[in-house]
Amino acid sequence: MKNNTLIPVYDLAACIPGTNFVMKKTEGTTVPSYLRVPHRHKDYKISFLEEGEVTHFTDFEKYVIKAPSLIMLAPDQVHQRDGDSYNKMVHISFTRDLLLTETQGLVACWEYMFGQVVIPIPTEEHRQELKTYLDLMYREFNSDRPAKETILKNLLNVFITAAARMVPCRAKEDGHASVMDSSYNRIVRQFKMLTDQHFRTKTRVDQYADMLYVTPGHLNDIIKSVTGKTAKQLIDEKRVMEAKRLLFWGELSVKEIAHHLNFEDDGYFNRYFKKHTGQTPALFQKNTAKSTISPLIM
């Protein structure tokens, strides 16, 4: 299922100009051909699995997911669907700017939620609550009433907040709370957005500090207080994850990937990758090509 180009990216805005929210329902056993190809999205996607089960690959894991569950996909995660089991699902795709400030403010919780990929719905009460919000969103999405976008925006944020209650955020090992001062949250959100855009070409903390009009030391203190990691660690994690995705899902050579990620040469890329993963890019590519992704049954 690999391709000899970069991994396809599906962009909500490009598909439907002027749209920052899309919602649809699916039911049956057929997986569309475009979902069977490894791809990623520029937007966030949440799928509510109401009945049945689906087989889903996200990055380097295989998930056989049973209803009722939520499937969470963050921008740039590589994923694909497989299998022919019956399922009934509701899908919502949205851009970050559709989130209310208060929802984005839950930085650690937000990142943790989307890091889960699969969130099993624990009780019938939770299932009914989420379904109520989804039904309201679906009715509004298919209407042509005044203030439609405002209603959708608020319903989406209520839905996400309700889903977050099913996933208590882990307390930080250093004792810091998940929700910090609003100015800290703003800087962390902006840092994450900037690293998403520029991690291939901007690799130093001072470059991001300049864009955020703070000192590198102050930026690092804020990032570590909220995430538990340094700003440099987060930049390196982005670069290593992208390298792994390209090595695993694509057929680019190590030299081509090094060039794509703006390394000086493939020798430096080899040393960098081994420092962060314990193995060379070629060995990682060889091992993952030989191995079968083990299923995680939910």
Image (cartoon, rainbow, N blue to C red):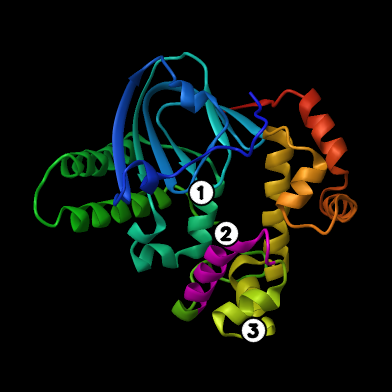
Q: Which residue is mark 2?
A: 196
Confirm or deny contact between disc 2 and disc 1 (CB under 8 A): yes
**Element type at mark 2:** helix
Q: Which residue is mark 1?
A: 75
Question: Pointer 2: residues within 10 angstroms few (<14), some, or many (20+)?
Answer: some
Identify residue type, mark 2. Answer: Asp
Identify residue type, mark 1. Answer: Pro
Q: Is 236 included in the stretch rendered in magenta?
A: no
Dot 2 or dot 1, earlier in sequence: 1
Give the dominant element type of the magenta stretch: helix, strand or loop.
Answer: helix
> Where residue 283 appears, x then y in whole percent?
87, 36
Tell which tag, 3 or 1, sits nearer the viewer.
1
> Where residue 108 appears, x then y in whole percent?
53, 62
Q: CA distance from mark 2 to mark 3?
A: 20 Å
Tell which tag, 2 or 3, sits nearer the viewer.
2
Confirm or deny contact between disc 3 and disc 1 (CB under 8 A): no
What residue is at 29 percent from the left and 52 percent from the top?
Answer: 18
Q: Which residue is mark 3?
A: 218
Magenta highlight range: 184-202
Picture quarter containing residue 69? top left
Q: Is residue 32 visible?
A: yes
Question: Pointer 3: residues within 10 angstroms few (<14), some, or many (20+)?
Answer: few
Q: CA distance from mark 3 to mark 1?
A: 27 Å
- The front one of 85 and 168 is 85
Image quadrant in which the N terminus is located: top right
Identify residue type, mark 3. Answer: His
